[in-house]
Amino acid sequence: MSNIKAHFQPSRAPGIPQPPENVKKIKKRIAIMSGKGGVGKTTVSVNIASELAKRGYSVGILDTDITGPNVPKALGLMKVPIYATDEGIIPAEGPLKMKVMSLGLMLREGDPVIWRGPLKAKAIEEFVRNVQWGDLDYLIVDLPPGTGDEPLSVMQLIPLHGVVLVTTPQEISLMDVRRALHMVQKLEYKPLGIVENMSYFTCPGGEKVGIFGRGGGRKLAQEEGVPLLGEIPIDPKVVEFTDKGIPIVIADPDNPVSRAFKEVVDKIEEILSQAEES
């Protein structure tokens, strides 16, 4: 059992420094990763964070997508300022008192971020080391697509308790998510499981139609030996509420999408709880 427990503990690949004090105060640190753009990773991130906050946990969200920072839009924070003190950067407060940090909070809408890799990595390091998160139960880290500079920077700075991988059923998405999964494993972090987003659409008559294919996430999970955390259906309300800056688990708790996210969070809590008990 000790080996299982060690496998689930925050791990550090060789050469990764100890986390700064402000990160050590965070009990659970989870990255949301896709490997591919356009799969709804930010939607998954903010809804997982919001569902955790609804359960009474203190939650922070760190948006590390430097060139496409969409978390502020998804949480209705486009015009919310952030402040710096002698102690560090004070994160914005989002719905359910979630603490939020994103480069998008510092940009005018429409301004591009035309930065090379080293500058992106420096910005992420500033967010990790200088944001005053305080004592949090969970930090959800929304990673950008791919397996390059930004995800690597995060994994080298923040010892993670696990990584959630987001895919759609489409084969081209599964290819990239498999690469992201293998990156996580190479860096000796624990994949908590796979979320298949845009899994199916339920027609008025009740028929479930796989617009982007069916069962791809489940098949990938089985082939790679990781849990399938959930299959999130397609619902136009998700777009409607996200554009208004309200995660669907808050706006419409009884929606099938919200119920699917609740099941995802149930499984994440169960996996982390089993690790602590082992």
Image (spheres, grey):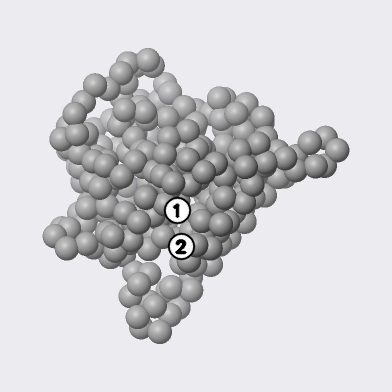
Above or below, 182 relative to 111: below
Image quadrant containing the N terminus:
bottom left
* Residue 226 appears left or right of 88: right
Above or below, 203 relative to 59: above
* Closer to us: 137 or 202: 202
* Residue 184 appears left or right of 214: left
Residue at the image position 30 percent from the left and 24 percent from the top: 106
**Marks 2, 1: nearer the viewer:** 2
Residue at the image position 42 percent from the left and 21 percent from the top: 79
Where in the figure is residue 168, as x and y percent of width and height?
54, 43
SS assignment at label 1 = strand
Asked if residue 2 shows in the view, the reply is: yes
Q: Which one is earlier in the sequence, the residue at label 2 or at label 1?
A: 1
Image quadrant containing the C terminus:
bottom left
Q: State which quadrant residue 243 falls in.
A: top right
**CB atoms of marks 2 and 1 within 8 Å:** no
SS assignment at label 2 = helix
- Most extreme residue toward the bottom is 1
- Which mark, residue 135? none
Give the amino acid type for the residue marked by disc 2 in the picture: Glu
Asked if residue 226 shows in the view, the reply is: no
Residue at the image position 37 percent from the left and 38 percent from the top: 145
Where in the figure is residue 51, as x and y percent of width and height?
56, 49
Residue at the image position 37 percent from the left and 63 percent from the top: 190
Q: Which residue is mark 1?
A: 164
Give the amino acid type for the residue marked by disc 1 in the picture: Val
Above or below, 86 relative to 185: above
User: How far is mark 2 from mark 1, CA to CA?
Assistant: 14 Å
Where in the figure is residue 39, as x and y percent of width and height?
50, 38
- Most extreme residue toward the right is 205
Q: Which residue is mark 2?
A: 224
Mark 2 surroundings: few (<14), some (14-19) or many (≥20) residues within 10 A: few
